[in-house]
Amino acid sequence: MKTRARGVGIVLTALSLALVTGCGRDSTDGDNAAVPGVTSEPCPQAVDQEKGCIYLGVITDLTGVFKLVGGPVTEGQKAFWAKVNAEGGIGDYEIDVVTNVKDNAYNPDTHASVYAEIEDKVLGLAQSLGTAHTNGILEDVQDASILTQPTSLGSNWIFEGGVTEIGTNYCAEAMNIVDYAVDELGAKSIAAVHYAGDYGDDNMVGARIAAEARDIEFTDIPIEVQVEESQAAAVGAIKRAKPDVVVIATGPTDLAAVVGLSAVGGFTGKFIGAIPSWNSALLASEAGPAITALYMQATSFGTWESDTAGHEAMRAAAGKKADPNDWYMIGWAGQYVMKAALEAAIEADDLTREGLVAAGEGLTGVSGDGMLPEGSGNYAGDPNERVVRSTSINKVDAKAASGVSTAAEAFTGPTVEAYEFTEPCYLQK
């Protein structure tokens, strides 16, 4: 497994040094940029025609099982950079996150294919949606020194170089869910319904670790992505296990299927979902009443209405053009990290791929104007010491702008507080 030391340990050839030394706008020549993704020519939708352009890639899900996540994340990122560009950009550049947007349809093979289409056109990846999907291109982006922000909370990212993950990982989040279920809901038994694979397994392992630590019954219920089917097998497994609380790590569509059918079958416990399981559009679905009654959301980010400078700026920029959506908010919030890395690379007069990776790996904390959880944006030092461990719990609230409001403020449960991360949790499935 590659480590963060990889990015800063790259040895440049003499030719590479000749190309990047003293990099500024003079190091580019129109479309024949010495640095991929950096040009002295203005962006296609430039605010200031006198500024150059930095192109960032976006690989997301616009048509697959996580389209209700990928779509708004991408729109939030576009809005963030539109605001940055309107306010003067970064140094001599504006940022383009529009030209190189690709749809992975939540398919790892498609993800790799569309990455290959933009690899030579971008300085970094502002978004790479999916844990297994990003893992599939990880060696390539590390070899190419492309700083990458995963739209994924896999526990593996803390051990990897050249990635700028944000928030609490799925494994730590699930530990906190179980501690909350035990301490606040009196749970004596837990079931984990999850997609098979890196994302779902990461969540399941965290739930299992916490269940063992709290000495409560645990049932593992892995499922496949169905979308058009009913998830009846998962519902049957829940009915047989009779858990007090179900920890669920799926997409929004399969969440609706599992919760809706479970309610019809008489389940009265709680579902507490990993952050990607939720989308406010679910409240308008047939499963809306069941979700309102039974579902809670775990997250390490605030709600749309949170009182921070970052949230205020986001709401002002969104205006009436975007429905309040937590994924739009997270798309916006995460780009504070990429902005900080770009600023650091430019300040170091090293706006190259290697320079941006070094800048990203050197960040020691980015608050995102209060939008990011405490401890985020820190990529230097020991992974176990800088991993974000806090989680808040939201309840469904039809009166709230994005359909949820805070039920429990950010906390760090006893299980994750004592846990030592030595490897990605999903490897322990």
Image (tube, rainbow, N blue to C red):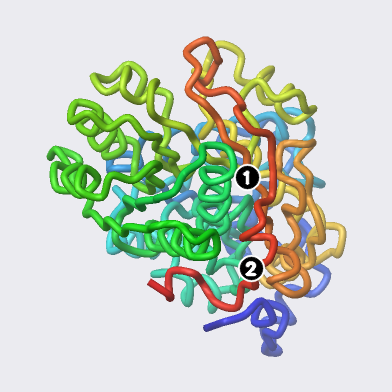
Which residue is located at x 56 percent, y 82 percent?
2
Q: Is residue 24 above or below residue 65?
A: below
For numbered disc 1, what is the local secondary structure?
strand
**Location of mark 1 (residue):** 391
Graded by Cα atoms within 10 Å as few (under 14), some (14 to 19) or many (20 or more), the crowding at tag 1 reads many
Mark 2 sits on what residue?
419
In x, y percent, where is residue 96? 59, 43
Residue 3 image offset from top left, x and y in percent: 62, 80
- Horizontal and vertical percent position of residue 284: 32, 16
- Inspect the image, locate mark 1, and give the three-letter code of the amino acid beneath it: Thr
Residue lying furthest right: 347
Residue 315 appears in the picture as rendered:
yes
Res. 124 image quadrant: bottom right
Please report the residue visible at 46 percent of the width from the left and 48 percent of the height from the top.
100
* Amino acid bearing label 2: Tyr
Please state the horizontal and vertical placement of residue 153, each as a whole percent of the image: 53, 55
